[in-house]
Image: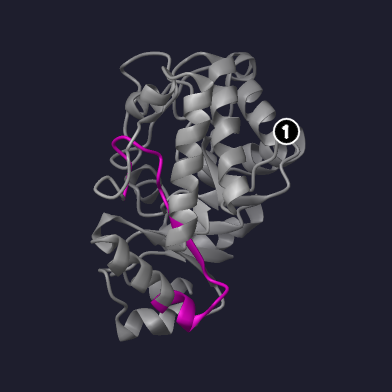
């Protein structure tokens, strides 16, 4: 099992340098607390790479309310992007992708491919909306431009956060739809976007009780049976932050190493001060 860890500030501490030397740490996920200016962020990235050159630098740069660089580049949300002509969409994603690559970013945890059917959806302000074809088209443009710039893309949140009202940071969202309902919408989006080529898939902390009694992020059914077999995904499967309450209040995170058996490749650990971090890596 490999881990994306986070850092406390804009500079590496000695303890963080020691963590980065461990082979189980595959990457660093940057948050707003790590981004002061272009220059300080570039310096931090170089400092990380100096410890281990093969460490991946990741970021959640969806745009809109989830952006680490709002003060550095134009910040378009996915709902706003869904209103733009495709040529303008491509131009924006091209600009953003090259900005991230020039900064030293290797992986963007975007786009969000969730289907938001109403404004009650927790990810309504983060998604392209409810039109399946538009979600597929815009997601593929984002991924293509990130690939052209040399970035890896991670789509999220499999198997679909769009129907959930609750915030998985705060509690476990329960989505009471049938397998047929999921097949008619979410399956089609994931199948098309994965089929067009994507490097990573992030699995969210969700429960679909009419389909499986397991939380999706630690579910053999969702990850092995559906994602890897039915959707034929061959890339990295990343578990959303293990300290989100959607998982941590239901699962003993100290046993997280055992979750490798369900098909996970990498985990996100967003709390740099949690003692579980040093035990895991």
Task: Say if the magenta span includes residue 66.
Answer: yes
On the rendered structure, is 118 left or right of 258? left
Nearer to us in this view, 192 or 147: 147
Point 32% across, 29% down: residue: 166
**Image coordinates for residue 238, horizontal then vertical, percent:** 55, 51
Q: Position of residue 76 (x, y in %)?
A: 35, 33
Q: Position of residue 198 (x, y in %)?
A: 65, 42
Q: Secondary structure at mark 1?
A: helix
Give the residue at x 37% y 13%: 118
Q: Nearer the viewer, residue 103 or 68?
A: 103
Q: Residue at x 41, y 52 (%)?
A: 241
Could you tell whether 60 is left or right of 106 in the image?
left
Q: Is 263 situated left or right of 259 in this image? A: right
Q: Quadrant of the N terminus?
A: bottom right
Highlighted magenta segment, given as a residue range? 47-68
| Residue 58, placed above or below residue 62 | below
Q: Residue 26: where, in percent of width, then height? A: 54, 68
202, above or below 37, in the image: above
Magenta-colored stretch includes residue 275:
no
CA neighbours of label 1 inside 10 A, class few (<14), some (14 to 19), many (20+)? few
In this picture, is 71 found above or below 260? above
Tell me: residue 129, above or below residue 39: above
Residue named by callout 1? 195
Q: Residue at x 49, y 56 (%)?
A: 101
Which colouring convention does the figure follow?
A: one colour
**Is residue 55 shown to the viewer in this render?**
yes
Along the horizontal axis of the image, is 171 left or right of 144?
A: left
């Amino acid at each position: 099992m490999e881990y994306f860890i986070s850092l406390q500030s804009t500079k590496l501490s000695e303890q963080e340098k020691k963590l980065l030397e461990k082979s189980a740490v595959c990457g660093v996920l940057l948050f707003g607390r790590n981004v002061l200016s272009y220059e300080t962020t570039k310096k931090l990235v170089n400092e990380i790479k100096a410890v281990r050159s093969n460490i991946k630098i990741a970021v959640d740069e969806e745009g809109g309310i989830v952006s680490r660089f709002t003060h550095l580049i134009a910040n378009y949300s996915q709902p706003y992007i869904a209103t733009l002509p495709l040529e303008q969409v491509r131009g924006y994603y091209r600009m953003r992708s090259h900005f991230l690559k020039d900064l030293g970013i290797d992986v963007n945890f975007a786009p969000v491919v969730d289907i938001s059917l109403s404004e009650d959806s927790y990810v309504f302000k983060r998604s392209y909306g409810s039109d399946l074809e538009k979600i597929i088209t815009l997601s593929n443009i984002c991924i293509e431009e990130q690939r052209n710039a040399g970035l890896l893309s991670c789509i999220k949140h499999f198997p679909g956060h769009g129907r959930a009202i609750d915030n998985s940071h705060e509690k476990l969202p329960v989505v009471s739809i049938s397998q047929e309902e999921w097949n008619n919408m979410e399956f089609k989006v994931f199948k098309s976007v994965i089929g067009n080529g994507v490097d990573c898939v992030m699995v969210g902390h969700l429960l679909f009780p009419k389909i499986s009694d397991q939380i999706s992020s630690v579910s053999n059914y969702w990850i092995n049976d559906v994602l890897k077999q039915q959707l034929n995904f061959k890339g990295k499967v990343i578990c959303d932050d293990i300290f989100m309450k959607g998982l941590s209040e239901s699962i003993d995170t100290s046993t997280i190493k055992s979750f490798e058996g369900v098909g996970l490749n990498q985990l996100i650990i967003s709390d740099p001060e949690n003692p579980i971090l040093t035990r895991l890596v």
